[in-house]
Amino acid sequence: MPSPSAVDTQTVLNVENVSVHYGSVLALRNVYLDIFKNKITALIGPSGCGKSTLLRCFNRMNDLIPGTRIEGRILYRGTDLYDKSVDPVEVRRRVGMVFQKPNPFPKTIYDNVAFGARLQDHQGSLDDLVEESLRSAALWEEVKDILQQSALSLSGGQQQRLCIARTIAIKPEVILMDEPCSALDPISTLRVEELMQQLKQHYTIVIVTHNMQQASRVADMTAFFNAEEAEGGNRFGYLVEYDQTARIFEDPQQETTKNYVSGRFG
Ligand SMILES: Nc1ncnc2c1ncn2[C@@H]1O[C@H](COP(=O)(O)OP(=O)(O)OP(=O)(O)O)[C@@H](O)[C@H]1O
């Protein structure tokens, strides 16, 4: 596969020939991919092509699914994420995750943001950390007078920005987002997309999205995956093409990518 056109930045994650099995079923095959610092990388492709599977490999969330087996290597700043000496809890501190459905804890707005920092025995002012994280997540102005209210009283879009604030408060380097806008209305979606553009100054973001317009609006880099039927009828995913987003949408090198981005399948 051709390597992406030149990107002038550091690599944070290297995916080297990664395949993932769930039990005996192959889900994702032979992926090579580099994730670049302070860029937004979108993983796109039809249902079942392994986007979420790969995303979960980046912070070892697949460890929590019994029977998952990963072959190949994923390097985080040169260290093999799956090396025996690596603590998955530490990985998840550096590589945070925001899920499809906003999932605040049934606690106050303040406690949601402070939760991870308290667990980590945060030194310094929690009030400052909560304010700074809510500001970074573009939510402070809306919630500064109701910090002691339940997070569940917020709208879906606000809850998702709160989950982003909760992730930021742990001070990760990478933020993974698994379809973060699919449960949101169009206005909340735009707010989260604007927020992502601000966040990439400080964080590296990888987003799984079904929405091609969203990928073309927010992502610097786009990886297109497809699924193919293996012997026995199971489908497995593989990477078709990875490049700067403008190239994937305007001048893809592979016929399958062209067909997908022009809406001919998926
Ligand atoms: N926990 C699991 N146990 C068994 N198989 C799984 C599990 N999670 C995913 N799979 C299988 O792995 C393959 C890839 O799924 P994955 O969810 O990563 O794809 P996806 O591209 O993110 O799909 P979607 O866009 O529908 O969310 C699919 O065949 C799926 O059925």
Image (tube, helix red, strand yellow):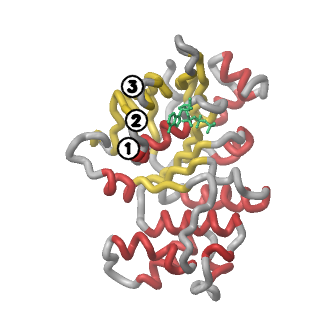
Q: Amino acid at mark 3?
A: Asn
Q: Tell me which residue sits at (78%, 28%) in the image.
A: 263
- The numbered mark, 3 or 2, whose residue comes first in the sequence reads 3
Q: Tell me which residue sits at (37%, 32%) in the image.
A: 69
Left or right placement of residue 32 versus residue 139 in this view: left
Q: Which mark is residue 68?
A: 2
Q: Amino acid at mark 2?
A: Thr
Above or below, comparing residue 210 to residue 111 in the picture: above
Crowding around mark 3 (Cα neighbors within 10 Å: few <14, some 14 to 19, many 20+) is some
Cβ–Cβ below 8 Å for labels 2 and 1?
A: yes
What residue is shown with label 3? Answer: 17
Q: Tell me which residue sits at (77%, 27%) in the image.
A: 262
Crowding around mark 1 (Cα neighbors within 10 Å: few <14, some 14 to 19, many 20+) is some
Measured in 3D between alpha carbons, the distance from the residue under mark 1 to the one under mark 3, in whole angstroms, is: 18 Å
Cβ–Cβ below 8 Å for labels 1 and 3?
A: no
The secondary structure type at the circle numbered 3 is strand
Whole-percent x, y for residue 62 in the image: 42, 42
Q: Please indicate, yes or no, whether residue 11 appears anywhere in the rendered image.
A: no
The secondary structure type at the circle numbered 1 is helix
Whole-percent x, y for residue 169 in the image: 46, 69
- The numbered mark, 2 or 1, whose residue comes first in the sequence reads 1
Measured in 3D between alpha carbons, the distance from the residue under mark 2 to the one under mark 1, in whole angstroms, is: 7 Å
Mark 3 beta carbon near ligand 1 (under 8 Å): no
Q: Amino acid at mark 1?
A: Asp
Q: Tell me which residue sits at (63%, 56%) in the image.
A: 101
Mark 2 beta carbon near ligand 1 (under 8 Å): yes
The secondary structure type at the circle numbered 2 is strand
Cβ–Cβ below 8 Å for labels 3 and 2?
A: no
Whole-percent x, y for residue 213 in the image: 74, 42
What residue is shown with label 1? Answer: 63
